[in-house]
Amino acid sequence: MLYRIEQARTRSRLRDFIELPFSIYRNDPNWVPPLRSEARRVLNERKNPYYANASIELFICYWDDLPIARAAVIIDKNYEKKYGTKTAFFGFFESRNDRAAVRFLFAEIEKYCRARYIASIEGPFNPNHYSELGLQISKYGTPPSFFQTYNPEYYPALLEDAGFKTSKTIFTAKNERIKEYFRQKQSAQLPSQNGKEFNVRAFRMNAFKEDMERVREVFNDAFDSNWHFLNVSKEEYEFSTKFLRFVTTPELLKIVECNGESAGVLMCVPDINPLIKDLRGRVGPLKFIRFLKHKKDIRRLIVYAVGFKKRFQRTTAYKLLYNEMVKMAEGYDTLETTWMSPDNLPAVKSAERFGMIPDKYFAIYAKQIDGMC
């Protein structure tokens, strides 16, 4: 086989990059096709404010004119400033079951990184720490929930053959009988302490930007010491939450305040993946109407993010949002988390309080680049 590497710097190459997974998963009934328009929006350096302090390069491995494998390389200046290491991140990795092609792809990527004095590469990040991340390493052949990655069973072997090793394992947790769980665990609900200092309220869609800024402020403070976390700018957050109003509802987004200051945030979303799957990668007026119509019928709830400013942790703020979570869960059959790190003990223990047990595991892979120290 004669392989070659191209960088997706033209419309046709970008189309090949975006379309490759559609050919790989063509016959996979569990795969949820990404929206092509959203993929282009996220990858666009001119439109996505994340790239104000980061760069992205898209690599495609071809055999003759057939795309075989792809990956993006992201270099984030803010990461180097905060953590003091010259690390590149790879993401959007997809490939046919061809180990030679993947070795060839990453050999070119390593050459690209070496020229920029990058010492190591890690991923998948799609494209950053607040996106979908990791490679699925368990429960293959099961449908992914919202904000979960999905891949065939052969993917880990492709990366390992290219010299990557697991650097971190993350997981999701799930309770498939949440209503029954709370009928049996009524004593688990904490007493409300909604007194003079603290109050909890729903997100205001008519003050979307103002409340999103409050959410960003809380999460930047709450997650600052978390693994790989980087503060998210106002512009980045507005970009990443552009379609939030279509994904969830105000009743599933709660803000707890202390004397008017935002202290904690609970963000939940229905598992809209079955509806996204029906869109088949493209949105049209009729598809969108059906999407909105059927969203209310979803019985699986995803805990997207929960965070408290550091000085409000272990306070009434937690108790208030816990009770809100109980109320939300009563309207669903299944409660599930997005990815969690095992060393984030507060998050792990909170999931356990809701009867959620580990469900799927995902791996982050890393590799030192030869010739760099």
Image (spheres, grey):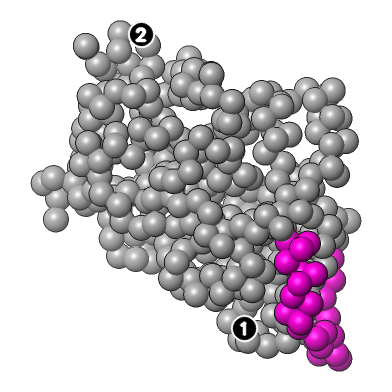
Q: Give the left or right position of residue 270, taking residue 46 as reference.
A: right
Disc ID at residue 223: none
| Above/below status of 57 relative to 321 | above
The quadrant in which residue 196 appears is bottom right
Circle 1 Cα neighbour tier, 10 Å, few/some/many (<14 / 14–19 / ≥20): some
Q: Nearer the viewer, residue 194 or 157?
A: 157
Q: Which residues are magenta?
A: 178-203
At label 2, the amino acid type is Asp
At label 1, the amino acid type is Gln
Q: Nearer the viewer, residue 244 or 28?
A: 28
Q: Residue at x 57, y 59 (%)?
A: 173
Q: Quick one: label 2 or label 1, which is nearer the N terminus?
A: 2
Distance between the Cα atoms at labels 2 and 1?
55 Å
Direction left: furthest residue: 371
Q: Residue at x 73, y 87 (%)?
A: 316
Circle 2 Cα neighbour tier, 10 Å, few/some/many (<14 / 14–19 / ≥20): few
At mark 2, the secondary structure is loop
Find disc 1 in the rendering and name its residue: 313
Q: Residue 48 in the image: x percent, y percent?
A: 57, 42
Q: Give the left or right position of residue 271, taking residue 249 as reference.
A: left
Q: Is residue 64 magenta?
A: no
Q: Residue 99 in the image: x percent, y percent?
A: 25, 27
Find disc 2 in the rendering and name its residue: 65
Q: Is residue 202 magenta?
A: yes
Direction bottom: furthest residue: 196
